[in-house]
Amino acid sequence: MIILQPLPYTYGALEPFISGKIMELHHAKHQQAYVDGVNAILQKEPSFVINSLENTIINLNTVPESIRTAIRNHGGGVINHTFFWNCMTPDQQKRRRIGHPLFETIDTCFGSFDGFKEQFSTAARTVFGSGWAWLCLNHQGALIIITTPNQDSPLSVSLTPLLGLDVWEHAYYLQYFNKRVDYITSWWDIVNWAGVIERYEMALSR
Ligand code: MN3
């Protein structure tokens, strides 16, 4: 059995950028549904044990084929959303981009911070259907932007995600309707850069 982890802040904490109603539904209904999905698989396949859901998603290839797609979708949904909650913060201090080598690497990889923002936003805007945009660290220590469909995680392709944006319609439709671009633009204001820096340092120290 896995359980739904609480949000690291209250449902309304990201207003006005993301409404409390969206956050409540996104966490208590959507992420809960992924948790339920994983538990349904575990119930059906008692021989399959999950010690760490993250390791399971990293080693997706070792999951029995009969349940691999279900784990990829539901397990990915659980992992991705927990990650996503931590990519945002109500704390003004954590939203600030303080001087840090991460931002020098961003400049090196994307030309400038604005260049990065532009490329990431374009990637997020152009995801067809449901999916995610990610800033990842690859094995060469370079930062790259990728998108994944559905609930696929960069972890499954040996990348370390540093920042992720959920562009499924359920993430914004109640507030932004069909205007995904407006949601993306607002989202930049609540990014938890302190968290991105923390993940970057952790990845480099491995
Ligand atoms: Mn979602």
Image: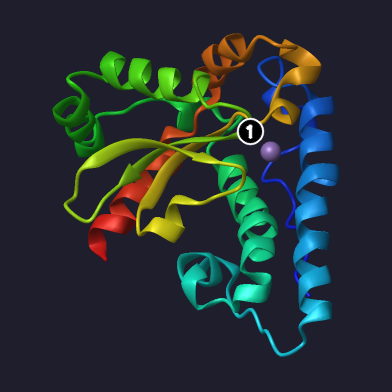
In the displayed orientation, state which residue is furthest to the front: 66
The image shows residue 25 at horizontal and vertical percentages of 84, 36
Tell me: 102 left or right of 145: left
The image shows residue 34 at horizontal and vertical percentages of 76, 55
Tell me: 45 left or right of 136: right
Residue 73 found in image quarter: bottom right
Amino acid, disc 1: Ser
Residue 143 found in image quarter: top left
Whereabouts is ligand 1, in terms of quadrant? top right
Q: Is residue 10 above or below residue 178?
A: below
In the displayed orientation, state which residue is furthest to the bottom: 47
- Residue found 80% across the figure and 70% down from its top: 39
The image shows residue 5 at horizontal and vertical percentages of 73, 57
The image shows residue 96 at horizontal and vertical percentages of 41, 25
- Residue found 30% across the figure and 14% down from its top: 114
**Exactly how many numbered labels are in the figure?**
1
Q: Depth check: 16 or 81 in front?
A: 81
**Which of the image's four quarters has the C terminus?**
bottom left
- Residue found 21% across the figure and 25% down from its top: 110
Assess mark 1: CB under 8 A from ligand 1? no
Circle 1: is it few (<14), some (14-19), or many (20+) Cα within 10 Å? some
Q: Depth check: 179 or 97 in front?
A: 179
Residue 205 found in image quarter: bottom left
Q: Assign a secondary structure to mark 1.
A: loop
The residue to which callout 1 is attached is 130
